[in-house]
Image (tube, rainbow, N blue to C red):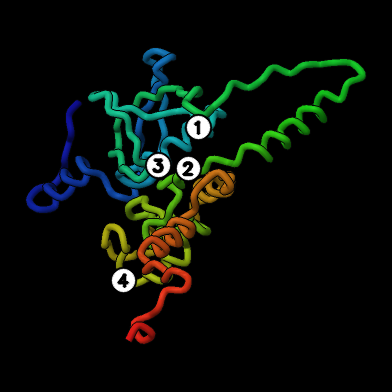
């Protein structure tokens, strides 16, 4: 396709550059297809020039009524699997989506059994309670895409900066509220100031925190590891020894 640019001098060059690069507030897109569905491409629109892998994975999962943990995003050109949720993908990227519903530690959903005059549901609940008492929950690291990059804690009422598409806690944005965005350093304007990121807030609220090692627990463990060992019972201190 050809690009028509009107005007001359500096104004024409600026218009050409804007047409080629786009504005950070423009609505842009990335494209994805499921590997199992052939070449049928679908589009996800977003504001800005880039979108985070975690946000794209959540959007695709919501659209397809899937768990985001059951899909992985792959670079269409290189075959690289995008592991980090905070990685930013440029506009017009093409992504392959792969289903991974049977990762280690997961189980197929059991078929429903209908038995007359038997409280099968109650028996199943009692069995689950018995297993829960015997087998403690095996916690895993908290997903980094749900940690605020400014305070390193779980997102709390997250906002999204419209200048660069990055998210942080609303309180963190307020603490860092200077003349410019704390991520891209662009000066705040009325149309670029943070707005609530309702999709991210919904995703964080849906997490079962019992299955994750929380950031506060990680910090407590690190402090305990750095603390000096306690003296053995009955051991004499330097003053007593003297």
Q: Helix, strand or loop at disc 4? A: loop
**Where is the C terminus found, in terms of image quarters?**
bottom left
Q: Residue furthest left?
A: 9
Give the CA separation, mark 3 to mark 1: 16 Å
Q: Give the answer, above or below, for where 25 lies relative to 103.
A: below
Task: Name the residue carrying label 4.
Answer: 179
Q: Position of residue 97 (x, y in %)?
A: 40, 25
Residue at figure coordinates x 74%, y 30% from the top left: 127
Q: Position of residue 184 (x, y in %)?
A: 27, 58
Q: Is residue 95 visible?
A: yes
Left or right of 91, for residue 190: right
Residue at figure coordinates x 30%, y 44% from the top left: 49
Task: Name the residue carrying label 3.
Answer: 46
Sequence-first disc among 1 and 4: 1
Q: Position of residue 54 (x, y in %)?
A: 41, 41
Sequence-first disc among 1 and 2: 1
Number of on-image labels: 4
Give the CA separation, mark 4 to mark 2: 39 Å
Sequence-first disc among 2 and 3: 3
Task: Name the residue carrying label 2.
Answer: 140
Q: Are marks 1 and 2 in contact (CB under 8 Å)?
A: no
Task: Name the residue carrying label 1.
Answer: 61
Q: Are marks 3 and 4 in contact (CB under 8 Å)?
A: no
Query: Can you tell which of label 1 and label 2 is closer to the viewer?
Result: 2
């Amino acid at each position: 396709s050809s690009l028509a640019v009107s005007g001359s001098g500096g104004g024409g060059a600026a218009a050409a550059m804007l047409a080629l690069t786009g504005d950070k507030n423009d609505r842009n897109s990335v494209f994805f297809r499921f590997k199992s569905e052939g070449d049928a491409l679908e589009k996800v629109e977003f504001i800005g020039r880039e979108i985070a892998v975690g946000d794209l994975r959540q959007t695709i999962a919501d659209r397809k009524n899937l768990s985001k943990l059951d899909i992985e995003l792959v670079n269409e050109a290189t075959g690289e699997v995008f592991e980090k949720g905070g990685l930013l993908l440029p506009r017009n990227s093409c992504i392959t989506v792969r289903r991974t519903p049977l990762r280690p530690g997961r189980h197929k959903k059991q078929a429903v059994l209908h038995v007359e005059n038997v409280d099968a549901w109650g028996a199943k609940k009692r069995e689950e309670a018995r297993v829960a008492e015997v087998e403690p929950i095996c916690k895993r690291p908290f997903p980094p895409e749900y940690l605020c990059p400014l305070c390193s804690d779980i997102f709390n009422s997250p906002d999204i900066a419209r200048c660069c598409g990055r998210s942080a806690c609303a309180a963190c944005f307020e603490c860092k509220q200077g003349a410019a965005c704390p991520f891209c350093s662009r000066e705040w304007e009325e149309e670029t100031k943070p707005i609530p990121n309702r999709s991210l807030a919904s995703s964080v609220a849906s997490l079962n925190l019992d299955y994750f090692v929380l950031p506060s627990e990680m910090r407590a463990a690190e402090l305990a590891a750095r603390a000096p060992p306690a003296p053995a019972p009955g051991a004499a201190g330097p003053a007593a020894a003297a």
